[in-house]
Image (spheres, helix red, strand yellow):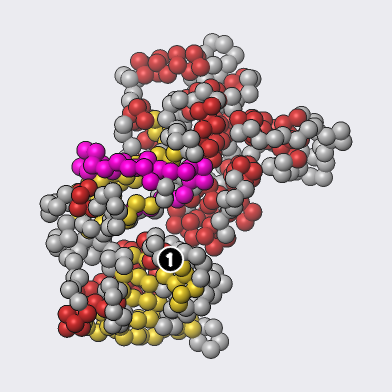
Amino acid sequence: MKRGIQKIRKTQYRQTGRMPYFYIERYLGEGMIIVKTGIVPLAAAALVSVLGVFFMAPAALASPQYQPSAWSSSKIEIAQTAGLIPDDFDARKFTDRITRKDFCALLINSCRIFKYALPGVPESHPFSDEQGASVEQAYLLGLTQGTADGVFGPDLPLTREMAAVMFGKLRLLFQADAPLMDEQQAAQILEDYAQDSKQLSGWARRYMADAYSRGIIAGTGDGTLNPKDYLTREQAVVLLLNLLAYCDASRLRAAGVTECVLPAPSGMHISPFYTKGQVNLSWNEIPSASAYDIKISKNGALAYTARITDHSLDLRTSTTGSADAVFGSDRQTVYAVLEVVPVNKDGDPSVFSLRREFVVLPAAREREMTSSDRSDPRVSGAAEGRVRLASVDVPVWQLSSTGAKKPATITLTVHQDVVEDVKKIFQEIYEGKEKFPIKSCSGYSDRGGTSQHNSGLAIDINPDENYFVARDGTIQAGKLWKPGENPYSIPPGGDVVKAFNKYGWHWSPDMHWSNGADYMHFSLNGT
């Protein structure tokens, strides 16, 4: 099949004036980019879907074998090399709906590639209408169930949400120490990234959101997941190949895969804007990685490389480089790209990487209220900070004794240069869908040391319900942090965090402090 794919690819490019890979992969690439293109726009990479809805007409050869669509042909070829695809898979159109039976065959082939021990075929068959080995092994592994008592329905098609649950369970087999996210995290991710999240069945929501957060699935380009649509055969192959690359890329290399494939980088949480000296980059931890190879480009030129063991790079405190050393001391805006390649325990780089664009802004540039670009209001000490303080009234929601939310106004003391920002931040929280309640809130406080509270550049919200927890798990301040259970606890990615981030303020847990995470604490400079 590999020769056929290569042949049809060359034919299509010749007939269409050699359509570049960039066009196909940006709009049709199912969340992957081939390294040899060298073109990976962030918006395109983050939004092109593993469960895509963009197709090119399949091109069939004269033989009974069918060829995949142009957007998927590279990954189908890789999957064939790895042994993921059954021998007769191309006897049907790749754009046909995949059946439950054929999807189970792909799941079991994935287990073989991953060297996961497969159960033996049972003497007493669980289904009356299907007794194939792949179906029964998938059932025994807990990857699938019947459609009724003793009935499997082998020829029925799969919806995308059904497939998400099945390959999510497969990931849990391979990564027992990386469980699914909780329901609240899943709800927040789906609300943020999927316009049609309400169409997802309750039993599929955590699986779909978990796959999205790990970069295995991305949106379809228009912010939809189309969970009720049927999964095609080529989509199923691409999706499972991405899953295997995420779980342990060395398995694909051992199977003969050498070409570098990049899944969509939706697992990277990087602010789009920074000021000089305040750059802290982070991404989701890859379970199979023992280290990460880092590359940072500045205005198109390589500016920094390193191998690190943590899944964040703090250029404020790094011993191998600083923001000034990487981005220069000039006063120009820098357009930068972070590229992260996971490295396994043997020191081998993965066959996939993560990529994210961001901007580093000069500290003295005029403020723009919809980004973190602002003049730097830091002061030399607490005494100077007290002179430059101002009071600001902001609207908040509070809870009555019956638990009902009621409007109120509180007064904060903050640095005079951030008064307008603070007004806008709290107005957005007040107008947000959550109507997040604020029981206690403070800004300026003379605490000594280097705390941003000394200058009125930090704000604590509901300190009892948003504790400061040290890296060893001990609680240093506050009592609890239970978002979803306690109404005063700040949820990740919620209205409060979004509002502060919009105006350049940082939430402590996102800053990866060496001494712990302060869930009550927001500050302009991340400290």
> Magenta segment, which residues?
281-308
Magenta part, dominant SS: strand
Instruction: Tell me if residue 426 comes above or below residue 169 in the rendering.
Output: below
Q: Residue furthest bottom?
A: 401
Which element type, helix, strand or loop, lies under badge 1?
strand
Residue drawn at x 44%, y 72% as measured from the top left: 468
Residue 199: x %, y % from top left: 56, 53
Q: Residue furthest top?
A: 62
Left of 470 or right of it: where is 386?
left
Left of 272 or right of it: where is 328?
left
Q: Quadrant of residue 24?
A: top left
Residue 17: x %, y % from top left: 31, 19
Residue drawn at x 58%, y 16% as measured from the top left: 65
Residue drawn at x 54%, y 51% as measured from the top left: 210
Within 10 angstroms of label 1, few (less than 14), some, or many (20 or more) residues? some
Residue 296: x %, y % from top left: 28, 43
Q: Is residue 170 magenta?
A: no
Instruction: Note whether residue 230 is visible.
Output: yes
Residue 469: x %, y % from top left: 47, 70
Q: Quadrant of residue 271?
A: bottom left
Left of 350 or right of it: where is 454?
left
On the image, numbered disc 1 is attached to which residue? 516
Residue drawn at x 60%, y 30% as measured from the top left: 113
Amino acid type, mark 1: Gly
Query: Which of the image's four quarters has the C terminus?
Result: bottom left
